[in-house]
Image: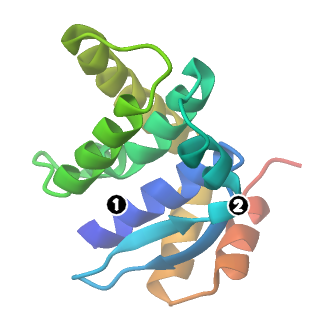
Amino acid sequence: ERTLRHEAGHFLVAYLHGCPIADYSLALKGARVALAKAVLQRELYRGRLEDRELDSLAVIAMGGVAAEALKYEKIVGQSEDLFDLQSLINKSEKELSDSEQQNLTRWAVARAATLLNEHSVAYDRLMEKMSQGASVYECICAIESAAPA
């Protein structure tokens, strides 16, 4: 269930940030949410990230950590997410000091947690679908079915 919560956190936060989801996996040795390369290619491979791009990608990267923190006292899935975040920070247009990096990390976790709380019905429906092995399309339909009319 921890892996499900973690990956669903990435999935929902990425969706809410307008980043297309290509695939996901809950396999213990390969749990991940794969974002559509076409969208990220421009942001990650063109050169440096602008502040708004870094902020958005940081929140997505910390979505899994935030999801775990909302349920569990101890977070165990943060290593890869923090590595991903550091890779993003390293691509920032402006060099961030250690304290700025720490502040970005804390803010991104808090922002992701806020989004997960604000969209808790969608998050619950998404976890249900992901636990059933639903397609990305079915997962997105579950998120959208929870949206207020």
87 displayed left or right of 144 = left
Mark earlier in primary sequence (1, 2): 1
Q: Which mark is residue 6?
A: 1
Viewer-closest of 140 and 102: 102
Q: Is residue 55 above or below residue 59?
A: above
Whether residue 121 is visible, yes or no, is no
User: Which structural element holds mark 1?
Assistant: helix
User: Which structural element holds mark 2?
Assistant: helix
Say what amino acid the circle numbered 2 marks: Ala
Q: Which mark is residue 36?
A: none
The residue tagged 2 is 38
Q: Is residue 32 above or below residue 30?
A: above
87 displayed left or right of 19 = left
Q: Is residue 36 above or below residue 25?
A: above
Residue at (56%, 47%) from the top-left corner? 45
Say what amino acid the circle numbered 1 marks: His
Residue at (45%, 83%) from the top-left corner? 131
Disc 1 and disc 2: Cα gap in Å?
A: 24 Å
64 displayed left or right of 74 = right
Q: Position of residue 139 (x, y in %)?
A: 64, 74
Q: Quadrant of the N terminus?
A: bottom left
